[in-house]
Image: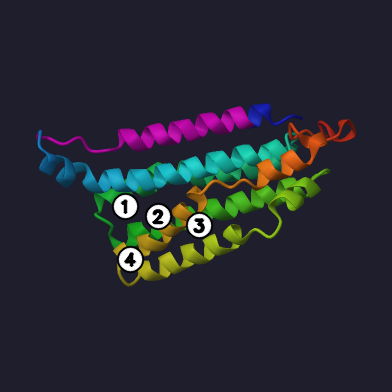
Amino acid sequence: MTSSRLEAFSDGVLAIIITVMVLGLAVPKGTTWTDLVHTSGLGLLTYLLSFVYVGIYWSNHHHLFQLRPAVNGAVLWANLHLLLWLSLYPFTTAWLTETRVAQVPTIVYGLNLLGAALAYTILQRTIARQPGGDRIREAFGHDVKGIVSPLLYLSGLGLSFVVPWLGLIPYVIVALIWLAPDRRVERYLSSHTGDAAGRPPEDEEDPAP
């Protein structure tokens, strides 16, 4: 089966996640900059961090299925597993904000980020195991960012036990690392004219679920 429905569903879920997060922002009672900073300052910062993460996953998810637009049942469930972790972002972000970056909420937020990263890795490897999955391995090669990110999440979790605010630093670093455009997929597709649209050969189209 093609991935069009999977991608449409995933896009809808990510849009809802962003909407729920922004609706959770506290509205200042007053009309001054001080009111804005005091009431919503931290909330805006945590929202921005989580928004960037959602944007990164949306972009990488799109690139991933450019390389392998045909999916089966295993890929569908791996994708749902990823969406499970991403759908927790509004909850963990709100808890982090409302507690002013307390220790346990910061740890839970870090576990949420780590869980989403591992789920994306599982999704990527599940797709790579399907017929034609060699495109994934060739395009991404030695994924340095994919290896470094979990290590930074773990360091953030460790720092959260000492000073919660310090635990956020590795999470911000990971976001900045992935915020830089990843052009590996575009380069791969442009160098493989037969895969210009990311489509597998006809004999590999629509594998049985």
Q: CA distance from mark 3 to mark 4?
A: 17 Å
The image quarter in which residue 2 lies: top right
Which stretch did the figure color magenta? Answer: 7-30
Residue placed under numbered mark 4 in the picture: 166
The image quarter in which residue 171 lies: bottom left
Q: Tell whether position 144 is magenta.
A: no
| Of callouts 4 and 2, the N-terminal one | 2
Q: Tell whether position 8 is magenta.
A: yes
| Of callouts 3 and 1, the N-terminal one | 1
Q: Position of residue 79 (x, y in %)?
A: 62, 41
Marks 3/1 in contact by CB < 8 Å: the verdict is no
Q: Which mark is residue 109?
A: 2
Is residue 77 at all visible to an observer of this figure? no
Residue placed under numbered mark 1 in the picture: 96
Q: Mark 3 or mark 4: which is in front? A: 4
Q: Which residue sits at x=36%, y=66%?
A: 160
Marks 2/1 in contact by CB < 8 Å: the verdict is yes
Q: Position of residue 148 (x, y in %)?
A: 55, 64
Residue placed under numbered mark 3 in the picture: 114
Q: CA distance from mark 4 to mark 1?
A: 14 Å
Q: Which amino acid type is shown beneath numbered disc 1?
A: Leu
Q: Which amino acid type is shown beneath numbered disc 2?
A: Tyr
Q: Which amino acid type is shown beneath numbered disc 3?
A: Leu
Q: Mark 4 or mark 2: which is in front? A: 4
